[in-house]
Image: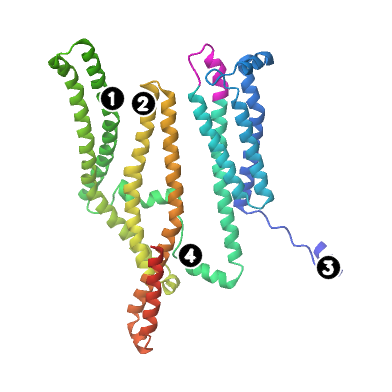
Amino acid sequence: MMQAASMEEGRTPLAPEAPLSTMASRVARLRKLLVAITLIDVVLVPAMLLLPFSGDASQWRSQIAHWSLGGSILDWGLVAWCRDVLVLVFLELGRRQSCPEAGARKARRAIVAVLFIGVLRISFLDWDLPNAGDDFVPTVAWGTLATFFMAAVAQALYKATCKLAEEEQSAMANGSSEAAADDTASSQYSSSLSFMQTLRVLKPYFWPSTGERWEVLMNRIRASATWLCVALSKIFNIISPIYLARATNALTRALKRTSDPQEITAEIVWPLVQYAGLVFLSKALKEAQSLVYIKVQQAAYIEIADTTFAHLHGLSLDWHLRKKMGNVIRSMDRGIQAAQQTMQYVFLYLVPTLVEALAVTLIFVFHFNNMRLAVFVFLNLYLYIYATVKITLWRKQFRSATTKHDNDLHDRLTDSLVNYETVKYFTAENYERHEYRSLVEKFQQTS
């Protein structure tokens, strides 16, 4: 009725407001949740600091007057409040500048930075002081819980804002027919997999299922034996230095008691034999892992290649009419190789190494009772991982350009040779040669 009346009066009816997309509503919910957690933390931080003193402000002021690095944690309130203020400021700036992903990214960095400051701060506390548990536990417990929860929400918010920005860019690109055509031409060769989709692709490397029944059984036994070799190799590598330390301690005690070489040798020889045996077993199991896993890699390679080939034949005729043959072949080969390298470097080398580093940190805490050394090792490991990831992401842009030019290069080469008669018919040999040479030059410039 209202639209009809407005049209009769010569006015254009108001268009209904477009509903928020699913990702936009998710971003709004996560942003509200992060703000709510931050405001709750602002209120509860002083409450947790006053809790050990039963709300007595005079005792709290006395703690401030006699503050020390190992005897008080009251300074955490200032650190937590600074984090909360930064989070709120970054989120608001991102909203006002219409760049929510930048605000979420900065908020996440502030939370993670304060998280590691808190871990370092806890390592300096003297837990042997009287009432140390009552004084430190409430603040440490709430600070750890709140920081981890805020970090998880900030990470989810950042991922959601990035996806929302991609959706908006895609919508803007699809606004014009030319941009839509370009997007259609490129979308058939570019896509991203989620973590679960990646695991499904890599499943043959964990649990092979191709070949005869006895081959499948043997490959699964080999895959299980590979993980057993990885675990035992890392365990032996972790505990072997303990026996070397025992040999060193035995040598020190023997030198204090006697100077007879035979007595000294008798005390240190067994720990040294244990150390050498564990090191040998660690290296041998690592080599055995590579040998046992060869057949599993071969079977997984065959299964992934077969699945990819069948997938290409299952695509529509329209896709095949628009495909670039050289690009498809090169992308297929590179994808299969990438799956094998991902499995080898991430799951067989990187993840076990991270678990080993975490185990060493726990040994420093529980075996040597040295929290500060454990925190120092952990923070250095984190800084190494952070620097490695940043440098890898920086190199990714160059690798992406190299991959793109490599695809174009093989696409031109394949199409030119497949359409040999057409090239000869139009006497386009020089043109094809010029185009191919320019693509080779671009590839070399980015490689």
**Residue 331 in sight:** yes
Residue found at x 54% / y 37%: 113
Please name whichever residue, 234 or 440, is drawn nearer the observer in this view of the structure.
Answer: 440
Q: Counting other residues with Cα less than 10 Å from the Cα at mark 3, is it few (<14), some (14-19), or many (20 or more)?
A: few
> Three-letter amino acid code at disc 3?
Arg
Q: Are marks 4 and 1 in contact (CB under 8 Å)?
A: no
Q: Counting other residues with Cα less than 10 Å from the Cα at mark 2, is it few (<14), some (14-19), or many (20 or more)?
A: some
Q: Are marks 2 and 1 in contact (CB under 8 Å)?
A: yes
Image depth: mark 2 or mark 4 in front: 2
Q: On the image, numbered disc 2 is attached to which residue?
A: 363
> Three-letter amino acid code at disc 1?
Ile
Measure how far apart labels 4 and 3 are at the Cα level. 42 Å
Q: Earlier in the sequence, mark 4 or mark 3?
A: 3
- Tell me where residue 403 appears, x and y as whole percent: 40, 63
Checking the image for residue 11, the label placed there is 3
Q: Earlier in the sequence, mark 2 or mark 4?
A: 4
The residue tagged with tag 4: helix, strand or loop? Answer: helix
Q: Up-down: is 107 above or below 336?
A: above
Q: Earlier in the sequence, mark 4 or mark 1?
A: 4
Measure how far apart labels 2 and 4 are at the Cα level. 49 Å
Q: On the image, numbered disc 4 is attached to which residue?
A: 187
Q: Earlier in the sequence, mark 3 or mark 2?
A: 3
Bounds of the magenta segment: 125-140
- Tell me where residue 220 appears, x and y as whole percent: 26, 45
Image depth: mark 4 or mark 3 in front: 4
Q: On the image, numbered disc 1 is attached to which residue?
A: 242
The residue tagged with tag 2: helix, strand or loop? Answer: helix
Measure how far apart labels 4 and 1 are at the Cα level. 55 Å
